Amino acid sequence: MVVAVMKQGQLERGRFSARSRDRELVCLVGRHGVMGIDQVMERMGCGRTVTYGRLARCVEFGLIERASIPGFPSTLLSATHAGLSYAGLGLPVASISPATVTHMLRCTSVAVGLERKHGPDRRVLTE
């Protein structure tokens, strides 16, 4: 319980400021529900090292969680309830299951492509 209070305080003190790329990452994952690491790298225009560093900070503060589905080769990312609140998104936490993960990732790929085509100021929500 004390750890959660400390982390919340650290969030408010600016380690995750409103203008940070970390917040942008949480918003991105939260909007799409479920993303793969490659999709995050493509959309944010960052390399593997930078992306993993940002993800590690977001996971440490409980804003994003990693999920592994047996038989699926990639780690999946989703925003937690705290992450969705932090990002200011009024969306429910994504429910990941083996039956829907392929569909969800394809929806995210289409949305990332649409955002790339129509410019960075356009935000697309997946289903």
Image (cartoon, grey):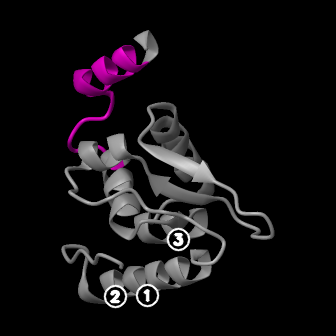
Q: Separation of disc 3 and disc 1 at Cα? A: 11 Å
Q: Kindly identify the residue that appears in the image at 36 percent across and 62 percent down.
A: 28
User: Considering only order in the chain, which callout, 2 or 3, is on the residue closer to the N terminus?
Assistant: 3
Q: Which residue, given by chain and number where applicable, does mark 2 sit on?
A: 114
Q: Which residue, given by chain and number where applicable, does mark 3 sit on?
A: 39
Marker count (numbered): 3
Q: Residues within 10 Å of mark 3 (few under 14, many from 20)?
A: some
Say which mark, if any, is on residue 74: none
- Tell me which segment is drawn in magenta: 4-21
Q: Separation of disc 3 and disc 2 at Cα? A: 13 Å
In this rendering, position of residue 62 left or right of residue 30? right
Asked if 25 appears above or below 109 in the picture, the reply is above
Foreground of the two, 29 or 51: 29
Q: Quadrant of residue 70?
A: bottom right
Q: Amino acid at mark 3?
A: Gln
Asked if residue 19 lies in the magenta stretch, the reply is yes
Q: Amino acid at mark 2?
A: Leu
Say if mark 3 contacts mark 2, CB within 8 Å: no
Say which mark, if any, is on residue 110: 1
Asked if 21 appears above or below 101 in the picture, the reply is above
In this rendering, position of residue 77 left or right of residue 25? right
Q: Amino acid at mark 1?
A: Val
